[in-house]
Image: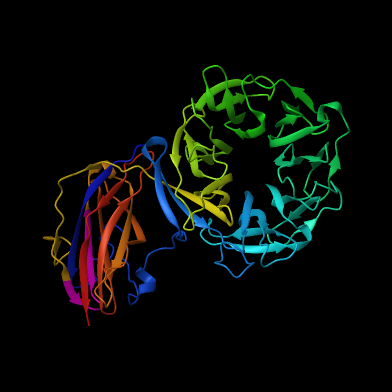
């Protein structure tokens, strides 16, 4: 709904006797105790996010405010976001009942023998702060992460699947793959929630096997089959009825499709798609693949769409012609649209050691907008978001920022900022007075502690029956005003008028403002502010 802000007239009046008002005012009285910062202070707000920031346009005139941060690691004597000559990376992110979880590696060849440690990072405040939990039994690192039914599942380079209910304490599944090939190539496990649980495809030493689990704790292998032989998975996505994997078999690109996780069929790769750098997602009731595309006139990044994973249509070009295409990760719904994060080249070498973080946004999965993400406070020469998830009102992309000698786990947190709304003046004067019936003026009312002050909110018949929120700010002893925060609410009468009175039992200086939230019947509105002061 399009929201319209109305100028509300607010009035204050001093009242000499309570009996003259009781039961006669529109809106019940407020006999508040002595005013204190706890009673009139701002309501709880999302935790602020440290780091560098930038904004991008989004759907319906909104914007997304992005903040980049280096996620701390526990190993090493160097700054807390990198460790020795190496630092760490976040290779997956997911949300669950307890908040946000990222998984990856914390490694530093100077401070921790054995090259590295598997680790998870947990955030209960939407990515503002993180707590690391090393999982040495899963060393040297986690490589994929998925969540379903209140359970997180990660794959380990040491072998096997690991599960956790909180993202902090991890247990190795007693069944599942025993070897994922060591540390030489971390992108050999594709993992996704779907088909009623979890689905995984593991390539190890040239052999490929598919795995299924209903709860992440027990896994069963799909039968050996020719479609899986030599398949090297790049990405896997699943819905409740079907799973699609994209990858390669030898030098050829391939797609695999299944409806039960047991029997996999090979599907012809769409013409021009580079499966070695592809990412697949479930978005908007369909499967999507974002991958480099090449033909006689294009070498860029494209999007393909399919309802069944078998018949594919190229729907978008993200970059129609580029020396080095963008690498784009999974697509997730966010607000009224969808977003995906990744990285693009920042030089002539195709981003091998010089790349910038980017985000793509779309209102309809067809028309896309590209924007740069902010660099992290410790900027690497290459910053690479790998995966993205949504937690509450925030989108969180994770990856790493690195140069030729050090690397840091990194996160980019996006928050939707509503579109600015036009304002319609009603030309109804605010006023204050000494009795409930007026006359009213805009003057600050000064009275003794324990007496009432009347506030009259004059709006418009357009707001008849609307819930009008009464917001209060306090002037502190240092002379600074607090932020306005909601205090109570009243229903506007047939003329759009609310009368409200307030008493402070001790010295206080308050400012009052009215807010109306838009609904199916009423437009949004916000008033001017008027003040009252209670003297000892």
- Taking 434 as reference, is 50 left or right? right
Q: Where the N terminus falls, by quadrant?
A: top left
450 part of magenta stretch:
yes
Q: Is residue 306 above or below residue 459?
A: above
**Residue 471 or residue 26, whichever sits in front:** 471
519 part of magenta stretch:
no
Q: Is residue 14 above or below residue 351?
A: below
**Residue 81 or residue 480, whichever sits in front:** 81
Look at the image and give the residue range highlighted in magenta. 446-457
How many marks the image carries: the answer is 0
Q: Is residue 536 above or below residue 72?
A: below
The residue positioned 45% from the left and 58% from the top of the image is 51
Q: Is residue 345 above or below residue 44?
A: above
The residue positioned 79% from the left and 44% from the top of the image is 214
Residue 100: percent from left, percent from top: 60, 54
The residue positioned 53% from the left and 32% from the top of the image is 324
Q: Residue furthest right?
A: 224
Residue 369 visible to an observer of this rendering: yes
Q: Residue furthest bottom?
A: 536
Q: Quadrant of residue 227?
A: top right
Residue 200: percent from left, percent from top: 76, 40
Q: Where the C terminus falls, by quadrant?
A: bottom left
Q: Quadrant of residue 33?
A: bottom left
């Amino acid at each position: 709904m399009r929201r319209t802000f109305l100028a509300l007239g607010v009035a204050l009046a001093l009242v000499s006797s309570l009996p003259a008002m009781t039961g006669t005012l529109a809106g019940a009285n407020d006999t508040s105790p002595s005013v204190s910062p706890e009673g009139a202070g701002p309501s709880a707000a999302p935790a602020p996010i440290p780091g560098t920031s930038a904004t991008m346009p989004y759907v319906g005139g909104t914007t997304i405010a992005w903040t980049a941060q280096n996620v701390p690691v526990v190993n090493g004597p160097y700054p807390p976001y990198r460790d020795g000559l190496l630092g760490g990376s976040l290779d997956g992110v997911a949300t669950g009942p307890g908040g946000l979880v990222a998984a990856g590696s914390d490694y530093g060849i100077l401070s921790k023998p054995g090259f590295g440690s598997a680790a998870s990072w947990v955030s209960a405040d939407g990515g503002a702060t993180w707590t690391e939990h090393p999982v040495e039994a899963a060393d040297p690192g986690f490589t994929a992460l998925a969540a379903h039914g209140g359970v997180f599942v990660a794959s380990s380079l040491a072998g096997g699947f690991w599960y956790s209910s909180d993202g902090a304490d991890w247990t190795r599944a007693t069944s599942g793959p025993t070897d994922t090939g060591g540390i030489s190539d971390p992108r050999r496990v594709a993992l996704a929630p779907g088909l009623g649980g979890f689905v995984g495809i593991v390539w190890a030493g040239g052999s490929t096997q598919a795995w299924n689990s209903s709860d992440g704790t027990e896994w069963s292998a799909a039968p050996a089959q020719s479609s899986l032989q030599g398949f090297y998975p790049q990405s896997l996505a699943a819905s409740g009825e079907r799973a699609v994997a994209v990858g390669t078999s030898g030098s050829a690109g391939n797609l695999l499709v299944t409806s039960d996780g047991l029997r996999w069929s090979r599907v012809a790769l769409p013409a021009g798609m580079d499966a070695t750098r592809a990412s697949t997602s479930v978005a908007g009731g369909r499967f999507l693949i974002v991958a480099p595309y090449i033909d006689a006139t294009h070498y860029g990044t494209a999007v393909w769409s399919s309802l069944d994973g078998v018949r594919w249509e190229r729907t978008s070009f993200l970059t129609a012609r580029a020396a080095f295409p963008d690498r784009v990760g999974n697509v997730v719904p966010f607000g009224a649209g969808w977003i995906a994060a990744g990285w693009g080249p920042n030089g002539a070498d195709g981003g091998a050691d010089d790349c910038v973080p980017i985000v793509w946004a779309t209102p309809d999965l067809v028309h896309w907008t590209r924007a740069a993400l902010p660099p992290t406070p410790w900027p690497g020469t290459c910053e690479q978001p790998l995966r993205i998830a949504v937690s509450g009102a925030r989108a969180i992309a994770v990856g790493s920022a690195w140069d030729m000698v050090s690397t840091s786990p990194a996160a980019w947190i996006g928050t939707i900022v509503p579109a600015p709304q036009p304002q319609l003046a009603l030309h109804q004067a605010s006023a204050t007075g000494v009795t409930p019936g007026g006359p009213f003026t805009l003057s600050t009312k000064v009275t003794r502690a324990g007496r009432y002050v009347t506030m009259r909110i004059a709006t418009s018949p357009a707001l008849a029956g609307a819930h009008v929120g009464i917001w209060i700010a306090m002037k502190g002893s240092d002379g600074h005003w607090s932020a306005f925060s909601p205090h109570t609410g009243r229903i506007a009468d047939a003329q759009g008028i609310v009368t409200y009175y307030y008493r402070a039992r001790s010295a206080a200086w308050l400012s009052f403002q009215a807010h109306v939230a838009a609904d199916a019947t009423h437009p949004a509105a916000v008033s001017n502010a008027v003040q009252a002061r209670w003297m000892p």
